[in-house]
Amino acid sequence: MAKIFCVANQKGGVGKTTTAVNLAAGLAQLEQRVLLVDLDPQGNATMGAGINKSDLQTTVYQVLLGMADVKGACKRSEAGKFDVLPANRELAGAEVEMGELDNRETRLKQALSAVNENYDFVLIDCPPALSMLTLNGLCAAHGVIIPMQCEYYALEGLSDLVNTIKIVHGKLNPELKIIGLLRVMFDPRVTLSQQVSAQLEQHFGDKVFKTIIPRNVRLAEAPSYGVPGVCFDPSSKGAQAYIAFGAEMVERIRAL
């Protein structure tokens, strides 16, 4: 039975897609069966996994509208050794079209139930907004992984996201909970980063992952080659950190 996690943050540019793609690759290296679901119309997770979004005939868009199933729409990330339910700009239209459909908040959950036994982990890369797409991700998931930079504005956005998760938990998905906060793009030389990191640990305790992802050029370069950073330069500090994060995730799930 797959454990399903959203990688979510309402703030843009905080490393959601980098985290989703590299966690998928890191888990695959630990011999976990992984499906990465790209719920962002920009399709960055799709491209980062090495799949050309402009060549796709079937995507998560058709799955959400009931015109295809997950198995038929999946592609393989050869570099990362995981499956991808891809997305492209077509997905932007799903917001409007799903508004008229029954069970519009749980359509992804229903679709994923058909492949639950095929995977150990399903990771959902959500868009940076509380939209119908993000809501579908939250309704399908057992938990939320929140990547965040250690800076002042990130703390403000975090409180909004925590409130959103509480609302979805109360009204739509009683299984949903915060699995953990992941500190990303971390620069230990910046005093503010150290201060915000300490505040997170003080306020959220063991909800803060021990692994910290450093700011790393090799991770930033990897998407332009269509390869997860974990595979692009396995010896880089960023790749090593995401592999360590994958191991921490496996341990945390066993403890739940």
Image: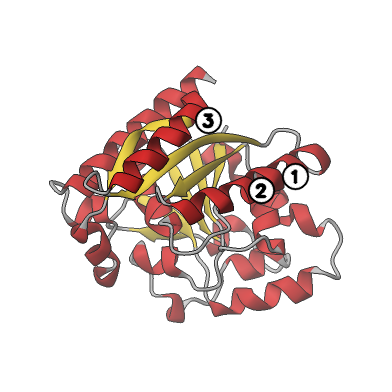
Q: As drawn, which residue projects farthest toward the bottom?
A: 54
For the residue carrying disc 2, how many other residues have a C-alpha within 10 Å: few (<14), some (14-19), or many (20+)? many
Q: Position of residue 110 (x, y in %)?
A: 72, 49
Question: Gap in Å between the C-alphas at discs 2 and 1?
Answer: 7 Å
Q: Amino acid at mark 1?
A: Val
Q: Amino acid at mark 2?
A: Leu
Which label sits on residue 138? 2
Can residue 242 be seen in this snapshot? no
Identify the residue under disc 3. Answer: 203
Q: Nearer the viewer, mark 2 or mark 3?
A: 3
Q: Amino acid at mark 3?
A: His
For the residue carrying disc 1, how many other residues have a C-alpha within 10 Å: few (<14), some (14-19), or many (20+)? some
The image quarter in which residue 28 lies = top left
Q: Position of residue 233 (x, y in %)?
A: 16, 54
Question: Gap in Å between the C-alphas at discs 1 and 3?
Answer: 22 Å
- Quadrant containing the N terminus is top right
Q: Position of residue 134 (x, y in %)?
A: 65, 58
Q: Is residue 203 above or below residue 218?
A: above
Q: Is residue 6 above or below residue 252?
A: below
Identify the residue under disc 1. Answer: 168
Q: Position of residue 227 (x, y in %)?
A: 27, 62
N-terminal label among 2 and 1: 2
Q: Could you tell me which residue is drawn at 68 percent across and 78 percent down?
A: 93
Tell me the element at label 1.
helix
Q: Nearer the viewer, residue 50 or 203?
A: 203
Q: Nearer the viewer, residue 110 or 166?
A: 166
